[in-house]
């Protein structure tokens, strides 16, 4: 299986179109090493600051980043066509790697 490189593009993670519960980017991006630089966390902080969801004090201690595998599944919400991201096993048809920062883990 070949490894595909994905660009670092941070997007909001929401539950059924509600308030954001985190951020994610397609692909497994280096994260968690502040000494070596952390491109995903830097991009996540910039995105959250840009969207005015958090200030610098709140962004200082973000929870741990997770590396997961998802796939996109068609769904309906209030009669409209949407798509949902669901956990998937690596190698499953349509599955892709993601780097995730769940903000609801910040209170733990």
Image (cartoon, grey):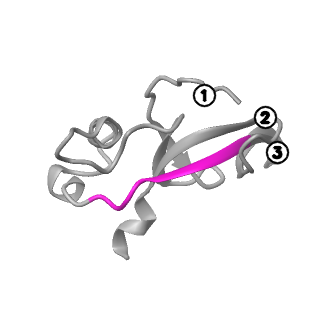
Residue 31, located in which quarter of the rendered image? top left
In front: label 1 or label 2:
1
Q: Position of residue 59 (x, y in %)?
A: 23, 53
54 sits left or right of 57 in the view: right
In front: label 3 or label 2:
2
Task: Please report whichever mark, 1 or 2, sits nearer to the chain's N-terminal start.
Answer: 1
Q: Position of residue 79 (x, y in %)?
A: 84, 44
Q: What's the magenta region?
A: 62-71
Please give the name of the residue rendered at 26% of the width and 41% of the height, measured from the top-left corner: 49
104 sits left or right of 84 in the view: left
Q: Residue under label 1, please give it.
A: 3
The answer for how far apart the CA atoms under marks 1 and 2 are is: 14 Å
Task: Please report whichever mark, 3 or 2, sits nearer to the chain's N-terminal start.
Answer: 3
Q: Which mark is residue 38?
A: none
Using the image as rendered, state which of residue 107 and residue 26 is in the foreground. 26
Q: Residue under label 2, please give it.
A: 94
Question: Under tag 2, what secondary structure?
Answer: loop
Please give the name of the residue rendered at 18% of the width and 56% of the height, measured from the top-left corner: 60
Q: Is residue 104 above or below residue 59?
A: below
Furthest residue in direction front, as rendered = 1
Please give the name of the residue rendered at 16% of the width and 45% of the height, measured from the top-left corner: 35
Question: Under tag 1, what secondary structure?
Answer: loop
In front: label 1 or label 3:
1
Q: How would you rate the neighbour count of disc 3 (Cα within 10 Å): few for under 14, some for 14-19, many for 20 or more?
A: few
The answer for how far apart the CA atoms under marks 1 and 3 are is: 29 Å
Q: Give the quadrant of the C terminus.
A: bottom left
Q: Position of residue 42 (x, y in %)?
A: 27, 38
Using the image as rendered, state which of residue 51 and residue 27 is in the foreground. 27
Task: Please report whichever mark, 1 or 3, sits nearer to the chain's N-terminal start.
Answer: 1
Q: Which mark is residue 75?
A: 3
Please give the name of the residue rendered at 42% of the width and 67% of the height, measured from the top-left corner: 105
What type of secondary structure mainly makes up the magenta span? Answer: strand
């Amino acid at each position: 299986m070949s490894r595909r490189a994905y660009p670092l593009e941070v997007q909001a993670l929401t539950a059924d179109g509600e308030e954001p519960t985190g951020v994610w980017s397609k692909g497994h991006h280096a994260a968690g090493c502040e000494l070596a630089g952390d491109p995903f966390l830097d991009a996540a902080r910039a995105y959250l600051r840009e969207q005015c969801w958090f200030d610098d004090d709140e962004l200082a201690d973000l929870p741990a980043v997770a590396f997961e595998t998802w796939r996109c599944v068609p769904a309906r919400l209030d009669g409209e066509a949407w798509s949902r991201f669901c956990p998937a096993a690596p190698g499953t048809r349509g599955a892709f790697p993601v780097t995730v920062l769940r903000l609801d883990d910040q209170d733990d």
